[in-house]
Amino acid sequence: MHNLFTVIRFTISDVIRHKSFVVLLGLGVLLVLFLRGCYGGSYVVNGRAVDSVTVAWHASRVAFHLIATLSILVSALLSMGIFRRERNEGAATMVLSRAVGRWQLALGTYFGLSFIMMLFMSILHVAIFGITFFSAGGIMPGFLTASAVCWLNILLITALVMVFSFFLPDFMAGLFGIAVAGISFLTDSAFRILQSDFAQQAFQGEPSIPLFWRTFISFWPKMNALQTYAVSLTGGNSPSLAGPLHPAVNVGLYAAAFAGLLLWRFRHQEY
């Protein structure tokens, strides 16, 4: 286990020194500062002024989604080609020559990158949590718990892109990982729209969804549904969930499956 934690520590150190991570972290901070301006404005809806607490509540939920989605994109960008980069630089060969097992190198790299991205997302969420507290004078219950739930999306997208990187060029691996997340966002959003009162009124009843598409939506990685469920923990209505499994279980199983595939593929990788 000592070797595993050593690889995790070195992976975190390597990612922090990476220029792209510094740039993306700066963009995340700028996003938080930009969203901060939404809390101080005055808004009128249907001729009535909206109080600051309501504005802060809605702005925080929007900010939560933006940060969680940004974290998925950043994770995909940093995950693509990480093993290929270590092999080209000779780091993997050096580590494996020091009685470090292949499974320790693979898991250490995976968990190290996942951890730094979880920390990245949590820091930005904590910043939004603090802005909400100082702007509206109150806290959103469940906000930090919701952030922790979204860690499952980080674990999935990281494993997904790492596995794709064994078979595809770096850019294509990242693009395919983002496409999986994008399809999840599109299908889950479409499902919620079809389940809305507006759609039922427009179709004079609940619209029928073909069995093939209903099955596809049910078993595709539920990354967007997990985010929506996480936001519901901060208050408001619980979302209607498509599929036989809870989004946390769905995403957790996919993350575990791709992590296992990562270990299997890394054992057969030449260095």
Image (spheres, helix red, strand yellow):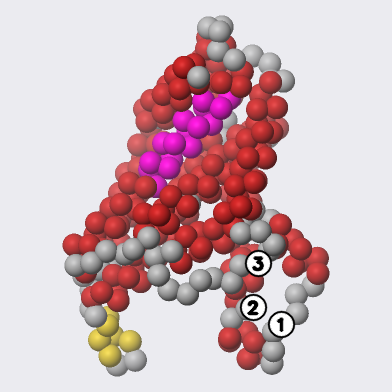
Q: Can residue 190 be seen in this view?
A: no
Tell me the amino acid under the disc marked 3: Ala
Question: Mark 3 or mark 2, which has the lower sequence index?
Answer: 2
| Dot label at residue 160 | none
Give, as a single range, the part of the protein colored magenta.
106-121
**Nearer the observer, disc 3 or disc 2?**
3
Question: Mark 1 or mark 2, which has the lower sequence index?
Answer: 2
Q: Name the residue under label 2.
A: 194
Which of the 4 image quarters holds residue 246?
Answer: bottom right
Tell me the amino acid under the disc marked 2: Leu
Q: Is residue 109 left or right of residue 12?
A: right
Tell me the amino acid under the disc marked 1: Pro
Please state the horizontal and vertical placement of residue 264, each as a whole percent of the image. 70, 27
Q: Name the residue under label 1.
A: 207
The structure residue drawn at horizontal position 40% and vertical position 54%, both measured from the top left corner, is 145
Label 2: how many residues lie within 10 Å, few (<14), some (14-19) or many (20+)?
Answer: some
